[in-house]
Image: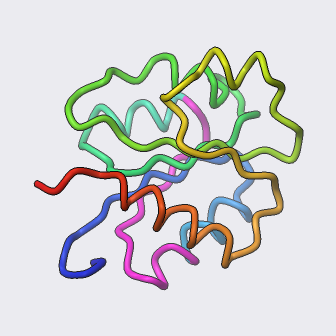
Amino acid sequence: MIDGVEVHVLVADDNDGIRDTTAAILRSVGYTVTEAQDGEAALAEFNQKPFDVVVLDERMPKLNGTEVVRTLSPVPPPPVIMMASAYDFDSDLRQHLGQRVFKYLKKPVPPKVLIEAVSAACATIPPP
């Protein structure tokens, strides 16, 4: 819970260590976190319940982060999506995804940067 409100975050990364660490960091500051090991699992989780924030690895098997973003239906309210990658995001990708992605993070993401980014994303979520 953050300020008395339960915030649901989906973390999708095919690297078990990165996914577990990211989830643990977010849980340590009060977020409710669900983990997915690849893009298909992320979509399955998204179809099961709503999420406020989705943190996606760009390069995953089955479906990469970009494919997940393109596939997510914009059900109200749309999740705030953050993309993470060890690789640079090119301007074509940023332009194509437009407003669907709140922030691009370069891996490895320091814990403080991750927490600040998710907190900033949550600040954009309209109140219930």
- The foreground one among 52 and 24 is 52
Residue 17, image x, y percentages: 74, 65
Residue 109, image x, y percentages: 76, 64
Is 75 a magenta residue?
A: no
Q: Quadrant of residue 98?
A: top right
* Number of marks in picture: 0
Relative to 28, residue 39 above or below: above
**Left or right side of 107 for 60:** left
Question: In the image, which residues are magenta?
Answer: 25-39
Residue 63, image x, y percentages: 62, 23
Q: Quadrant of the C terminus?
A: bottom left
Q: Quadrant of residue 93?
A: top right
Give me the residue at 49% from left, 36% from top: 41
Relative to 72, residue 58 above or below: below
Give me the residue at 31% from left, 24% from top: 74
- The foreground one among 110 and 64 is 110
Relative to 61, residue 3 above or below: below
Residue at the left extreme? 128
Residue at the bottom extreme? 28
**Left or right side of 63 for 35:** left
Give me the residue at 68% from left, 70% from top: 113
Relative to 92, residue 39 above or below: below
Is 36 a magenta residue?
A: yes
Q: Quadrant of the N terminus?
A: bottom left
Give me the residue at 33% from left, 21% from top: 73
